[in-house]
């Protein structure tokens, strides 16, 4: 791109307007409103245009961030969008849910002295802008290179599909649920990622020629072997997270105990917040305890508040500093009145005479020596047990991979934790022609890491099919 | 690529994608049409005033379905996902048969569907098949209570085919609620009927008949019981003392049904199991039925509210 002369403008990071916490706890509408074109230009003007392009190196899908920013600065928003889309099939989603503070933004030179460039907000802006302009202008590539099956329409699968269709493959995505998007649909709440955005990104892939088959559970409805026999030259498994983990403490099957997966699926995919206009109910109660400190826990507790809980409580065994959730999510939750009970670990869920949750017995913890994860290990303080009065308990402790594919695909190895074994660089599994990526391989991680895996697998599939 | 091997006819199978205004996809992907397909009902039978049988066009599910498995269905755009146990399958015709009893809103909506109409979503087959769990010889007693007779049917058929002597006990509150008697007779060496009010067969519960068989001293190698949770619990109690291996098919509340949400968990032999991927058939003597009875009622008030709202609103 032609470098025009510019001088970076020194100004603080342009804030993104958002819904007032007092208002937003009563609805599921998106919290941040996004930049206006003026705000986007002002923020883009802060970019130093440095030669090291550290931000690009920090991006799992290597978006040409400086190129995007330069075009935004010139007001060429659609062109900026096209630059992003060259390497990122889902920019409207990444602009919202990527942990930019650990990826591109953490490496930004501006961050050394002040606040880094708001790369995520800019990415979101160009994607939203292009969508509003009706970006169906994406052309449909010729498909002549062969057929690839993608299993699962979450971030890994959608990314692999987008890259492969651009490379000229006939791509079919098989999705087990009745709607595409995987965790983007069932897991991440509407107020953080509007479902219309997910649908628009999926529709765009369909417009490019990707085929989507809903209600097909690979491993049950069709096996991987049958997909290969049917003429798919490569198969990518992006089957995502599986069964929720529980703590193995008494009372976990009481009425009113949920896994975060169930609580979020009822709320997001099934729209229980619109019950009875939508048919799926959910039990929330007055006081909701969410056990865990990750993004999923924050999503669950913020849903609980919006579903009418008077108190949403995060129960986490380490301190706030060790919480794996994004800082931004923790702040949003705190703004919405979520109570944080850190250094606290459940020992037992107590039920009433009808078998419904009435309390969560917890023990206080202190931090000891660092453990294998490098974080200080939480140790129970003897005799510090106390009872927390709650109506609902949501366990957000991670998941173990879904066993169906592994059980039904001969030659596909999984590790001890049940994750599919795949080459880190290519995603190739122990079964020739079969690739995998995302949570199915890594266990619970982030949307963008799954997208990165989908991207690398797509490139590897392309190499394999070209070399024959 | 169509018409090769086991995928013959795939090009006629459409996956609906109408909710997002997007394109409709054909599974063999060499053709895209704009026709919206549903999982069409080719036959509907009113088994009782509240129990309906549906034979549904779902060739992909029918191709793989086995006795003991289930499907997850939705009836409308805003509908919930509910599991239905497979009562029969016809691979050639590409159909799956399910039997539904009206209890809550969704089952009421299903029961209103007519021939030619269809399900909004119909996915499966899910869960583990019964076949590996069944004995290969000797004598088996199958017990079906209420609309639970339907999923017993294909299991009895497998046993019969293996040359196992099949005694079937079917029961209901009253004669009018008894279903699939002829069909059960056709796959059983002996069919016994019980009704709570004595309007047909033995006056009493299916467990009374089962206890009598056991007391008569005839050897029973396995019992398979499917029906209301309270009935299955009672069967488990009857067969526990004589130590007769007993299988039950649990039907907990499910959401995704594919091993993701964990709604369907139950305690079996003191361990948490998930009915959708570990079941739905379990060793009856190890299942915590009281817990399941309680969990089954978790949304009872919501179900009433939804049913009431629907009846009063008159909307479909």
Image (cartoon, coloured by chain):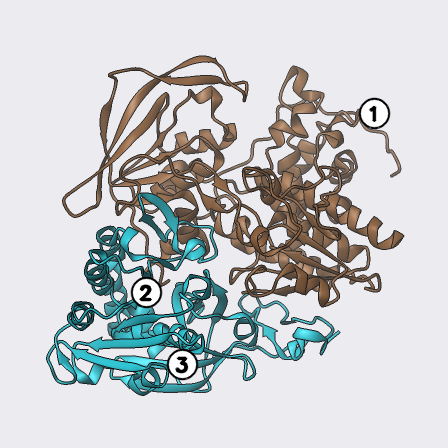
Chain colours: A brown, B cyan
Q: Do labels 3 and 2 share a chain?
A: yes
Q: Give the image location of residue A119, x and y in percent.
A: 66, 34
Distance in Å between CA atoms under marks 2 and 1: 75 Å
In the image: residue A462, left or right of residue A110: right
Q: Residue at x 63, y 64 (%)?
A: A212
Q: Mark 2 lies on which chain?
A: B
**Disc 2 target residue:** B222
Circle 3 crowding by C-alpha within 10 Å: few under 14, some 14–19, many from 20: many
User: Is residue A210 visible in this depiction of the protein?
Assistant: no
- Indicate which disc residue A51 carries: 1
Q: Are marks 3 and 2 in contact (CB under 8 Å)?
A: no
Quarter where residue A383 is shown: top left
Q: How many labels does the image show?
A: 3
Circle 2 crowding by C-alpha within 10 Å: few under 14, some 14–19, many from 20: many
Q: Do labels 3 and 1 share a chain?
A: no
Q: Mark 1 lies on which chain?
A: A
- Indicate which disc residue B54 carries: 3
Q: Nearer the viewer, residue A197 or B185?
A: B185
Distance in Å between CA atoms under marks 3 and 1: 67 Å
Q: Which of A112 and B120 is in front in this view?
A: B120
Quarter of the image with the N terminus of chain B in it: bottom right
Q: Give the image location of residue A8, x and y in percent.
A: 75, 25
Distance in Å between CA atoms under marks 3 and 2: 30 Å
Q: What element carries label 1?
A: loop
Q: Give the image location of residue A290, x and y in percent.
A: 36, 36
Quarter of the image with the C terminus of chain B in it: bottom left
Q: Residue at x 42, y 21 (%)?
A: A318
């Amino acid at each position: 791109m032609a470098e025009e002369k510019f001088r970076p403008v020194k100004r603080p990071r342009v804030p993104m307007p958002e819904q007032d916490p007092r208002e937003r706890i009563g609805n599921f509408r998106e919290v941040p409103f996004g930049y206006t074109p003026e705000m986007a230009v002002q923020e883009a003007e802060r970019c130093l245009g440095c030669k090291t392009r550290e931000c690009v190196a920090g991006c799992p899908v290597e978006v040409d961030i400086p190129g995007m920013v330069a075009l935004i600065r010139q007001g060429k928003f659609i062109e900026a969008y096209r630059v992003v889309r060259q390497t990122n099939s889902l920019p409207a989603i990444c602009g919202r849910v990527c942990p930019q503070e650990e990826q591109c933004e953490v490496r930004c030179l501006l961050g050394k002295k002040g606040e880094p460039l708001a790369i995520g907000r800019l990415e979101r802006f160009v994607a939203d802008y292009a969508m509003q302009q009706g970006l169906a202008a994406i052309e449909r590539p010729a498909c002549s290179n062969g057929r690839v099956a993608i299993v699962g329409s979450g971030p890994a699968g959608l990314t692999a599909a987008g890259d492969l269709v651009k490379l000229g493959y006939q791509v079919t995505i098989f999705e087990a649920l009745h709607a595409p998007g995987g965790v983007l649909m069932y897991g991440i709440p509407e107020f953080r990622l509007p479902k219309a955005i997910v649908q628009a990104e999926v529709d765009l892939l369909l417009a490019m020629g990707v085929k989507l088959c809903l209600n097909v559970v690979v491993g049950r409805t069709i096996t991987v072997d049958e997909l290969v026999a049917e003429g798919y030259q490569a198969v990518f498994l992006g089957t995502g997270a599986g069964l929720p983990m529980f703590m193995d403490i008494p009372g976990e099957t009481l009425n009113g105990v949920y896994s975060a997966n169930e609580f979020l699926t009822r709320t997001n995919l099934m729209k229980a917040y619109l019950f009875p206009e939508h048919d799926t109910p959910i039990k929330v109660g007055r006081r909701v305890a969410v056990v865990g400190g990750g993004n999923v826990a924050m999503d669950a507790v913020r849903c609980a508040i919006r579903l009418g809980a008077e108190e949403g409580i995060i129960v986490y065994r380490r301190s706030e500093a060790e919480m794996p959730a994004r800082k931004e999510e923790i702040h949003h939750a705190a703004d919405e009145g979520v109570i944080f009970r850190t250094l606290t670990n459940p020992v037992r869920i107590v039920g009433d005479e009808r078998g419904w949750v009435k309390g969560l017995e917890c023990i206080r913890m202190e931090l000891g020596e660092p453990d294998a994860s490098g974080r200080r290990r939480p140790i129970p303080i003897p005799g510090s047990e106390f009872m927390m009065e709650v109506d609902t308990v949501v366990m957000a402790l991670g998941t173990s991979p879904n066993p169906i594919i592994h059980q039904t695909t001969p030659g596909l190895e999984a590790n001890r934790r049940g994750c599919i074994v795949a080459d880190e660089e290519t995603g190739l599994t122990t079964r020739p022609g079969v690739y995998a990526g995302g949570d199915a391989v890594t266990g619970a991680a982030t949307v963008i890491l799954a997208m990165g895996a989908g991207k690398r697998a797509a490139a590897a599939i392309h190499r394999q099919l070209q070399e024959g | 690529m169509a018409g090769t091997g086991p995928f013959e006819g795939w090009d006629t199978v459409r996956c609906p994608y109408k909710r997002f205004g997007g394109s409709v996809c054909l599974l063999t992907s060499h053709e895209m049409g704009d026709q919206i397909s549903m999982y069409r009902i080719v036959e509907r039978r009113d088994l009782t005033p509240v129990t309906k049988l549906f034979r549904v066009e779902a060739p992909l599910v029918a191709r793989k379905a086995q006795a003991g498995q289930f499907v997850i269905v939705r009836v409308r755009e805003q509908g919930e996902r509910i599991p239905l146990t497979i009562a029969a399958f016809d691979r050639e015709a590409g159909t799956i048969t399910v039997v539904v009893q009206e209890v809550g809103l969704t089952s009421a909506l299903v029961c209103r569907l007519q021939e030619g109409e269809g399900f909004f979503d119909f996915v499966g087959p899910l869960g583990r098949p019964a076949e590996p769990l069944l004995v290969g010889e000797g004598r088996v007693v199958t017990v079906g209570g209420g609309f639970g007779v339907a999923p017993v049917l294909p299991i009895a058929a497998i046993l019969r085919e293996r040359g196992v002597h099949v005694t079937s006990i079917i029961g209901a509150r009253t004669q009018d609620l008894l279903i699939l008697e002829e069909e059960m007779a056709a796959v059983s060496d002996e069919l016994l009927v019980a009704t709570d009010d004595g309007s047909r067969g033995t006056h009493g519960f299916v467990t009374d008949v089962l206890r009598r068989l056991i007391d008569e001293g005839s050897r029973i190698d396995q019992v398979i019981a499917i029906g209301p949770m309270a009935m299955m619990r009672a069967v488990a109690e009857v067969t526990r003392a004589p130590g007769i291996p007993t299988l039950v098919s649990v039907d907990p509340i499910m959401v995704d049904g594919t091993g993701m949400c964990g709604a369907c968990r139950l305690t079996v032999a003191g361990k948490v199991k998930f009915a959708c991927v570990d079941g739905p058939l379990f060793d009856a003597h190890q299942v915590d039925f009281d817990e399941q009875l309680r969990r089954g009622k978790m949304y009872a008030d919501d179900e009433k509210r939804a049913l009431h709202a629907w009846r009063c609103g008159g909307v479909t």
